Amino acid sequence: MRSRLKTALRSLALALLCMGLAACSISNAPASEFSSSNSSTTSNSAYNRSSGTAAEQLLDEVVFPRDKVVDVKITMDEDDFQDMLDNASAEEYKPASVNYNGQKIDNIGIRTKGNLTLRSVVQMADSDRYSFKLSFNEYVNQTLAGLEKINLNNNYSDASYMREYLAYELAETMGLPTPKYSFVNIYINGELWGFYLAVEQIGTSYLERHFDNAYGALYKGVMTGSGSDLLWLDDNPESYTGLELKSNSHNGNVLIDMLDELNHGSDYESVLFVEEALKYIALNVVTNNTDSYIGGNKQNYYLYEVDGIFSILPWDYNMAFGGLGGGMGIGRGEPGRNQRAEDTENSVPAAPVPEARQDTPIGDDTNQRAADAAQGPSGTSLLIDEPTQGTLAERPLVAKLLAVDAYKERYHSIIEEAIEGYLSEDRFSARVEQLNQMIATYVEQDPTAFYTYEEYQQGVTQLMSSNAKQVDNIAQQLAGTIPSSGDGSGSGGGMGGGTRGGMGGNMGARFNAGAAPDTPANINAPTDAAGEQGATPTEARQEAPDQQGAIPAQAAQEAPDQQGAIPVQAAQEAPDQQGAIPAQAGQEAPDLQEGAPAGGNQQFVPNGQMPQGEFQGGRRAPDGMGFGGPGGFGPQNSQQQGSSSEAITAGISLLVLLAASAFVLYFRRKRL
């Protein structure tokens, strides 16, 4: 009897030990935006979460097939849909159901999304073509093939519909961790709404697929706040408001350790996956994507940490292939539906282009001559060894890594592989034509298109010709026949007062749920003033006060780009208006591809030249700008580091372990 009691108590002690260890692992769980995916799914889930090649095959065949266009059929209350369109700036979730390529899921959330893109569409008098976010676990704990959210991007400012698709495809060939993506035809309440690009949300499924875990610290670089340039500020993580924490846990001082080493040390491989960082820089250079870390807004990238080493993740490429680097046409138009006519008098004007670069001493035109030579006939290329808008020193990820000869040599090899491979004229043109054959009919039938079908055809041709010029220019820089760097002041460029509009002049009229679209009308307007410079879906759910221009003392203060600046709005984003959500679904953390709602904050963006060959005209917007009036960034709630629930879980775990240890010690003494 006594031996049985001892055996039972030993078993109890062992069970307590196992419970304590399990509780410890739970307290180390990933971000709240991922936490709901760890629970069992309900009957509404199309698939349960799985791992390995089977899960990826499911994504590739059902959710993101690349060889065809799939239908995404959304059903929701028509009043809710109209309210979502009428109040798009609020980015408030509405309940809906979706049939995603044959997979039916009820009780999902849908909302508008975007940053400058959203604000531009808000002010268009005749368009409601917003980007959308589908949140499968917004109200019920469920996923679609393991995905909690999918973004439906409206291809704003891209007449070819292909820029983001091609950039992500190139990223894949380079070996970068890339989200899934595919073309989709969206239906709302049985009516064709538009032809979009679906992009996977960076979340648990993405991280587990690329890193075999989802427990690391995840940050996103945003254009509001300080620190997205990765310059050293101080040793307080809360000072880096431009690096938004997207995970519940920051894993100690890993971010500060990385920034310290990057800015003050030389052992970069101890804190960075250097190969991946070089590929990320190269991707943005060869696609001339300045709406990224290298650009004036220093945004649209993620940092993910595993065991103290950070990877940089590519994100948001609708401005790739010179979509932003060449600037916008600025024209005058009619006020949008949410702006009074008299307000146009106070709309943001196009900034004049200064006679000389303000970041170069008078009489010293070294960098300007180098940039002019690098640009060549197309006027769109970057200096490959100095690709930054702003001084090179203000982008330590570029400056520090390229200062190491071995890294610079590898970087050049990566660029060479890209321009001789995927981007080579024959191969790239063949791929563009292949996509054209797949999507042209859908583009032609798109009822809410930003461009006419003729402009789409011109855009496809221009995309191929511009890439050919860019590749030739980069090849000359690699060969040393033209400069690849200058005096350290960067490549300049950015958004500017170009003369030919980037936005097409024929957009589908406002489209009410359940009704046929109105007849499109040709309307001249400013080219994507928001679109090409900042019309990117940035996801700052709680944007920080604008610290742009408050760069640390050791670096030059960043002003609007040295060739003039155009202030555009960047409103502080309010927290999600989700209402009451079942606890088991998990509280959504700041979404990863979201922007601030339209509203009265002002952001400065760099000026530059309009890419040759852009289309005349565009959409009407007040004073040529698709933004609202000036304003200032409001206060931001500081990012929480950890949570009370984690502390409680950790405390319970410690008590359980102590109790188990007491049992073990007690019985050992009895035996003695």
Image (cartoon, helix red, strand yellow):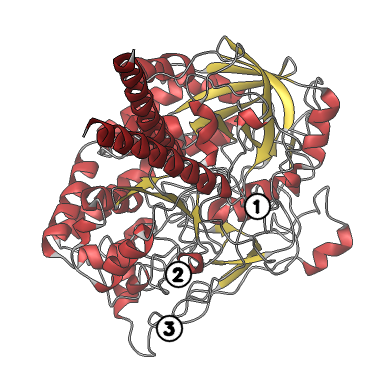
Task: Say the numbered circle drawn on residue 114.
Answer: none
In what element is the residue under mark 1? loop
In the depicted view, which residue is nearer to us: 290 or 96? 96
**Residue 596: numbered disc:** 1
- Place of residue 428 in the rendered image (x, y in percent of width and height, measured from the top left): 31, 34
**Counting residues from the N terminus, which is met first, the one under dot 1 or under dot 3?**
3
Q: Nearer the viewer's eye, disc 2 or disc 3? A: 2
Q: Position of residue 249 (x, y in %)?
A: 46, 49
Q: Nearer the viewer, residue 610 or 200?
A: 200
Residue 121 vertical placement versus 432 (above, below): below
x 41%, y 74%: residue? 234
Furthest toward the bottom, the residue is 362
Q: For the point 41% across and 68% down, which residue is it?
A: 492
Q: What amino acid type is highlighted by mark number 1?
A: Ala
Question: What numbered label is drawn on residue 236?
Answer: 2
Amino acid bearing label 2: Asn
Say if 219 sits above or below 520 in the image: below
| 39 sits to left or right of 596 | left
Amino acid, disc 3: Ala
Image x and y of residue 278, in percent: 25, 53
Quadrant of the rendering where the C terminus is positioned: top left
Mark 2 / mark 1, whichever is N-terminal: 2
Is 420 rendered above or below residue 102?
Answer: below
Depth check, mark 2 against mark 1: the one in front is: 2
| Label 1 Cα crowd, 10 Å radius (few <14 / some 14-19 / many 20+) | many
CB of mark 2 within 8 Å of CB of mark 1? no
Q: What is the spatial separation of the Cα atoms under label 2 and label 1, in whole angstroms?
A: 25 Å
User: Can residue 317 be seen here?
Assistant: no
Mark 3 packing: few (<14 Cα in 10 Å), some, or many (20+)? few
The secondary structure type at the circle numbered 3 is loop
Circle number at residue 553: 3
